[in-house]
């Protein structure tokens, strides 16, 4: 009897179960194990991909250069990218020119600057009181000046990639305090997994990196978290979904389905009710492979700045979805372009500026989300003044329900995307 | 400057694979080869060595460190030529499949470096076929032994100097696109069959 039952089950089950599976379209996505890959992980783990007829295949990568090369070669359909990467690829700087687009933002904020404990003591030794970026920057400048007078080697800070927001954030912060990041200090690239060791070995004095690496340094008693990206430039783009432009053209329906799946995933990831589950999900070896306790800190914004001290709450430490966080503001792409010019990575040209403008694709984002049952508040503009909002404010949107939060740069600077040249002329320190 | 004067750095945390690569480069006549296995101070080491060619395993997260080096080089107006250019997508593909990436710094001509890269890739392929490091170390030892034996046979039977015997083996291997040790094994086998 048992045998008969089994054979019937075998004959029926594959038809019932496998049929819908066969229709799923596989999308290969490369990612780097960081907290801000969460939206991709949630889309795959919670089935938001299958709901849109997709099967996400997430491939863990070890370097941003590999991510870029494998997207270029077609090994990946798309990838978790630093916001500067599709812009650099579209402009053909740093590597071969491959038009690459960003139709969806995977995360805002989330980075932090951590310094060694000896450097932290030197910064405090200047008598600085505040914890704001301007005060800490002035204190850092004093340390830099004192070291020069004493004939010591310049301080060394690390970031993760030349076309990373980490690079631009560190430079923006230091230059505002009168530190020339190319002359007064050394700025080097170090892969995140080597940051903590390098800090401990004294090869570097500080770094700017995404989570969980700041928290891991703090937990190990090696570093002090000094500043967050939210304090330097709130609601600034960090990671994007990077897609080769020709793949996007050839697979538009798939890309639009993917954007819908990612939108739902980002909503889920941003919901405080899902924090514990998300932290456990990301902690798995297939993704970050670090303790969920540490991941939970960045998700909740309750950040441990130094071992043995109570946590400090940071509003908007990392943002996955709220306040149009996924919307690819063209103004943010142009801001990154100005930083590339400011620091000598790119020549200022209307051609490059156009390439940067065309790289972020609000049009694709809008089409994907308009044609769905998702009630997404779509902004009525593609660009905005960056750094102009001091508090929450309702803005023009298709349904009139969109609110944007404070998006200020710490120095009060406002970026008008229609005048990148004028913006650049304002800075005394540039390459 | 002849090809064999190229200043080459091999970045690899796996000492066995790095040694194989170094051997391969030395076999091909390159004498200025530096191995870097310690990643925490990579940029400083590279600045000191100023390599013209860098070979790095694609699985190494320190690949991103090289990206910055290229940028810095560009800023100080030292020419940076990447071996893989837009027309070379098949070449990048081969490099990625082989788990190796190569960059040429210093405005070199492609054709002068291609043989190194080809050889590097074939070495990586050879590596991936081996099951583990121990097996690899053993086979490397065996390769050396068989090459020594083949050299001895050639020297004795054809009255060649050691250097010429090695050169003949190497040239035959290159012409037939085979491993030096495979050619050496053929020589040893033939000598055995011919009873000499």
Image: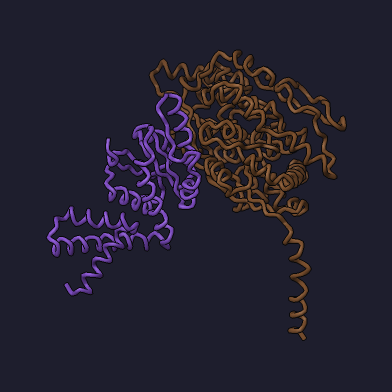
Chain colours: A brown, B purple
Quarter occupied by the N terminus of chain B? top left
Image coordinates of residue B73 in percent, x first then y, are 43, 28
Q: Is residue B52 visible?
A: yes
Q: Is residue B16 left or right of residue B155?
A: right
Quarter occupied by the C terminus of chain B? bottom left
Q: Residue at x 49, y 19 (%)?
A: A143
Image coordinates of residue B38 in percent, x first then y, are 40, 43
Residue sitting at the far bottom: A1
Q: How many marks?
A: 0
Residue sitting at the far left: B159
Q: Residue at x 68, y 39 (%)?
A: A106
Q: Is residue B133 left or right of residue B90?
A: left
Q: Is residue A294 visible?
A: no
Q: Is residue A211 left or right of residue A182?
A: right
Q: Residue at x 32, y 38 (%)?
A: B7
**In terms of depth relative to the viewer, which is nearer, A234 or B161?**
B161
Residue A232 drawn above or below residue A103: above
Image coordinates of residue A67 in percent, x first then y, are 56, 43
**In terms of depth relative to the viewer, which is nearer, A264 or A295?**
A264
**In terms of depth relative to the viewer, which is nearer, A130 or B124?**
B124
Q: Quadrant of residue B113?
A: top left
């Amino acid at each position: 009897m048992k045998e008969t039952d089994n054979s019937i089950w075998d004959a029926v089950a594959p038809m019932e179960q496998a049929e819908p599976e066969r229709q799923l379209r596989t999308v290969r996505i490369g990612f780097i194990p960081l907290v801000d890959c969460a939206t991709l992980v949630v889309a795959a783990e919670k089935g938001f991909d299958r709901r849109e007829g997709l099967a996400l295949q997430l491939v863990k990568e070890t370097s941003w250069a590999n991510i870029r090369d494998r997207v270029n070669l077609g090994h990946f359909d798309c990838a978790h990218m630093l916001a500067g990467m599709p812009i650099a690829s579209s402009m053909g700087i740093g590597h071969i020119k491959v038009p690459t687009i960003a139709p969806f933002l995977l995360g805002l904020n989330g980075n932090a600057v951590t310094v060694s404990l000896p450097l932290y003591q030197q910064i405090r030794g200047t008598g600085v009181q505040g914890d704001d970026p301007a005060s800490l920057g002035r204190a850092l400048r004093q340390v830099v000046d004192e070291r020069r007078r004493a004939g010591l080697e310049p301080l060394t800070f690390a970031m993760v990639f030349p076309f990373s927001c980490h690079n631009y954030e560190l430079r923006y912060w230091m230059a505002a305090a009168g530190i020339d990041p190319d002359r007064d200090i050394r700025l080097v690239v170090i892969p995140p997994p080597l940051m903590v060791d390098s800090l401990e070995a004294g090869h570097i004095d500080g770094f700017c990196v995404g989570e969980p690496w700041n928290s891991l340094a703090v937990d190990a008693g090696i570093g002090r978290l000094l500043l967050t990206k939210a304090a330097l430039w709130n609601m600034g783009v960090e990671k994007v979904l990077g897609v080769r432009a020709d793949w996007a053209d050839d697979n538009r329906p798939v890309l639009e389905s993917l954007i819908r799946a990612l939108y739902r995933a980002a909503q889920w990831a941003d919901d405080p009710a899902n924090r514990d589950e998300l932290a456990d999900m990301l902690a798995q070896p297939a993704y970050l492979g670090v303790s969920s306790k540490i991941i939970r800190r960045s998700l909740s914004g309750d950040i441990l700045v130094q071992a043995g001290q109570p946590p400090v709450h940071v509003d908007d430490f990392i943002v996955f979805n709220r306040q149009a966080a996924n919307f690819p503001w063209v103004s943010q792409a142009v801001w990154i372009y100005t930083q590339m010019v400011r620091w000598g990575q790119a020549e200022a040209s209307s051609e490059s500026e156009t390439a940067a403008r065309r790289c972020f694709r609000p049009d694709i984002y809008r089409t994907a989300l308009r044609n769905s049952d998702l009630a997404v508040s779509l902004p009525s503009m593609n660009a905005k003044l960056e750094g102009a909002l001091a508090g929450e404010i309702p803005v023009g949107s298709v349904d009139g329900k969109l609110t944007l939060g404070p998006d200020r740069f710490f120095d009060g600077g406002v970026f008008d995307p229609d005048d990148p040249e004028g913006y650049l002329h304002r800075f005394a320190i540039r390459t | 400057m002849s090809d064999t004067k190229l200043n080459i750095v091999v970045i690899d945390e796996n000492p066995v694979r790095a040694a194989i690569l170094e051997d391969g480069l030395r076999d091909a006549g390159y004498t200025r080869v530096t191995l870097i296995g310690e990643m925490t101070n990579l940029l400083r080491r590279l600045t000191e060595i100023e390599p013209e060619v860098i070979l790095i395993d694609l699985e190494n997260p320190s690949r991103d460190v090289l990206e910055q080096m290229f940028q810095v080089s560009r800023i100080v107006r030292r020419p940076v030529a990447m071996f893989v250019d837009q027309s070379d997508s098949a070449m990048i593909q081969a490099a990625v499949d082989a788990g190796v990436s190569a960059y040429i710094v210093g405005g070199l001509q492609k054709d002068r470096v291609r043989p190194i890269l080809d050889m590097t890739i074939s070495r990586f392929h050879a590596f991936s076929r081996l099951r583990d490091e121990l097996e690899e170390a053993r086979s490397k030892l065996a390769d050396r032994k068989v090459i020594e034996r083949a050299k001895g046979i050639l020297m004795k039977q054809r009255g060649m100097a050691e250097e010429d015997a090695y050169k003949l083996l190497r040239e035959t291997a290159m012409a037939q696109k085979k491993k030096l040790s495979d050619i050496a094994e053929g020589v040893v086998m033939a000598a055995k069959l011919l009873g000499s």
